[in-house]
Amino acid sequence: MTIKMSTLDTYVNDPDQEIKNITSSFSQHVQLAGKDTPYRPRLVFFDFFGKKSFGIVSRSYVDQTDYISSIAEMMYTYKSLDASSCILVLDSFLIKGNKNVGSCLYCYFINDDSAHMVCLPYSYNDNQVVWDLSAQDSQSIDLKDHDHTTQQMIELLYVYSHISNSPFRFSDLLSYYSSMGYQFKSFKNLNVSYIDYSKTK
């Protein structure tokens, strides 16, 4: 199995580098916070030229329903920012034959026309992440053909990337994110003013 980088070129300029950034970020998280500290869902949005514009990490969540809600809240940024693509990173189990056989980072590459999933299996050696490079894989996904991806997640990603008009202004989303404990960063000057509620707590 291998990652077909050529299939990911339509989402970002340098998919190989983006995947290296993701694995490096996760490895650093484990080293600093420990393997028992949850790696929260995170999204990076890209502009028309395939360059990073905005990144966000989920707030805390209390159960699976709240977990899904946090992803949906972050996905509102897609249309509000008029992004051309995004990458959603989730830490989950590696399932084969309906059995849990390990751990995996699932990276969803999404744009208006298509979606791909990249699977990055890993294990631990103490607090060090060991990546199983030979088991890394990528595949195209859609509403009907989506092995290893839940129907709920596919529908969520499709709906929130295909909203005709964003129900929220980007500035309002930033204010909301700051009030709820999301961590976010702009990779370029977005010229947006918002109320930073994190500074009032």
Image (cartoon, rainbow, N blue to C red):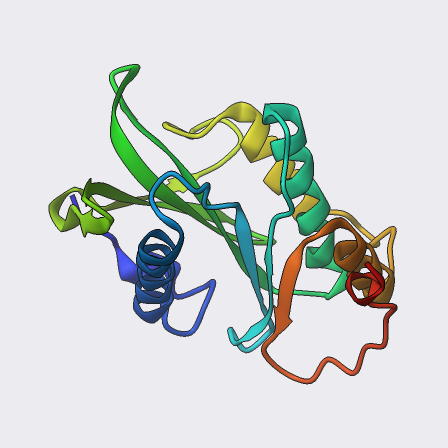
Q: Is residue 32 left or right of residue 52?
A: left
Q: Quadrant of the N terminus?
A: top left
Q: How many marks?
A: 0
Q: From the top left corner, tell me how far across and down residue 151 is, in percent.
A: 53, 25
Q: From the top left corner, tell me how far across and down residue 65 is, in percent.
A: 65, 25
Q: From the top left corner, tell me how far across and down residue 130 is, in percent.
A: 17, 49
* Residue displayed at 38% across by 38% down: 36
Vertical comparison of 2 with 36: above or below? below
Residue with the most extreme left position: 134
Q: Quadrant of the C terminus?
A: bottom right
Q: From the top left corner, tell me how far across and down residue 66 is, in percent.
A: 67, 30
* Residue displayed at 63% across by 33% down: 68
Residue with the most extreme front position: 201
Vertical comparison of 106 with 168: above or below? above
Place residue 199 in its image quadrant. bottom right
Q: Nearer the viewer, residue 178 or 139?
A: 178
Q: Nearer the viewer, residue 109 or 102?
A: 102
* Residue displayed at 60% across by 41% down: 157
Q: Is residue 134 left or right of residue 91?
A: left
Vertical comparison of 85 with 107: above or below? below
* Residue displayed at 63% across by 60% down: 183
Q: Is residue 185 left or right of residue 9?
A: right
